[in-house]
Image (cartoon, rainbow, N blue to C red):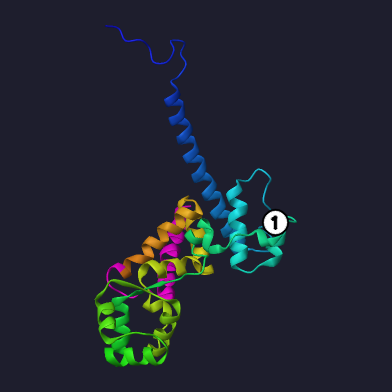
């Protein structure tokens, strides 16, 4: 039996096929908008004085993200420019802005400590677990010896930022050296040196800045996956050597 053609016989596509194509175009458009917004925010962070001109045809996400970043930096002049006469009070709280949260611009309620890094720092400080617990208690935190023992054998532990700061002070280490890889990578990505490396790698590889950032963060995370502490300075030095080596190779090929 011959099956009738799909549609109404006139060559018209089925409505469900049109809906699927519309959905695919919408997803692609969303990805483009997010990429444009992130790259605009990176340009602003690199040069706040000249990177705030938003074309009239730019996606709405560009202006929204720039407003969130400017608010995080307390850049009143930028906010006034971006809102173009609208009251700054209309800006939503950073904690309610999904783009700001995704980029790590919203104030964090918790940070993540590496159990292995905490144990290593305590041992270098020649403190027993009970001594560290006592010092933290004296600083106003309710931390018991058994609790610290569990933290040290855990891969990562969420703690309040103020507790992290006091632990680092007691152990005489940089806060970043106690962070689990997920938090340290986020802090690393916001440093000017990392943004410069991302731009250089994007130029070498042909990737977008966003893709170059993801690639370099993956490279930087490898030592932490092998059990080493994540340190921004060490990671940046290693990444710089990596990019420089490829820049030298590229210059020889030209």
Name the foreground residue: 102 vs 28.
Answer: 102
Instruction: Rate crowding at label 1 as few (under 14), some (14 to 19) or many (20 or more) other CA atoms within 10 Å.
Output: some
Name the dominant secondary structure of the magenta segment: helix
Residue 230, percent from left and from top: 37, 73
Q: Is residue 188 left or right of residue 115?
A: right
Residue at (28, 71) in percent of width and height? 155
Kindly identify which residue carries mark 1.
83
Query: Magenta stretch: residue 233 in it?
Result: yes
Instruction: Specify the segment rendered in magenta.
Output: 225-254
Label 1: state its secondary structure. helix
Residue 31 appears in the rendering: yes
Residue 125 appears in the rendering: no
Asked if 24 appears above or below 89 in the picture, the reply is above
Residue at (52, 49) in percent of width and height? 34
Picture quadrant where residue 212 is located: bottom left
Picture quadrant where residue 1 is located: top left
Residue 136, percent from left and from top: 37, 88
Residue 74, percent from left and from top: 63, 69
Name the foreground residue: 9 vs 245.
Answer: 9
């Amino acid at each position: 039996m011959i099956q009738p053609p799909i549609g109404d016989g006139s060559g018209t596509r089925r409505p469900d096929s049109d809906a699927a194509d519309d959905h695919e175009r919408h997803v692609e458009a969303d990805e483009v908008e997010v990429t444009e917004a992130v790259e605009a925010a990176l340009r602003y962070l690199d040069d706040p004085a000249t990177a705030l001109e938003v074309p009239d045809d730019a996606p709405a996400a560009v202006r929204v993200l720039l407003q969130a970043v400017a608010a995080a930096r307390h850049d009143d002049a930028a906010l006034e420019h971006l809102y173009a006469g609208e009251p700054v009070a209309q800006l939503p709280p950073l904690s309610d802005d999904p783009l700001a949260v995704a980029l790590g611009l919203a104030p964090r309620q918790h940070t993540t400590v590496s159990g292995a890094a905490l144990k290593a720092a305590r041992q270098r400080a020649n403190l027993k677990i009970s001594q560290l617990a006592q010092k933290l208690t004296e600083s106003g935190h309710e931390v018991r010896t058994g609790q610290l023992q569990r933290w040290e054998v855990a891969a990562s532990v969420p703690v309040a930022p103020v507790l992290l700061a006091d632990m680092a002070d007691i152990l005489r280490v940089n806060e970043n050296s106690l962070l689990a890889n997920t938090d340290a990578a986020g802090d690393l990505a916001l440093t000017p040196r990392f943004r410069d490396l991302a731009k250089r790698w994007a130029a070498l590889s042909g990737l977008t800045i966003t893709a170059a950032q993801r690639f370099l963060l993956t490279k930087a995370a490898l030592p932490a996956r092998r059990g080493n502490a994540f340190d921004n300075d060490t990671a940046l030095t290693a990444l710089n050597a990596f990019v420089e080596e490829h820049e030298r190779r590229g210059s020889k090929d030209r």
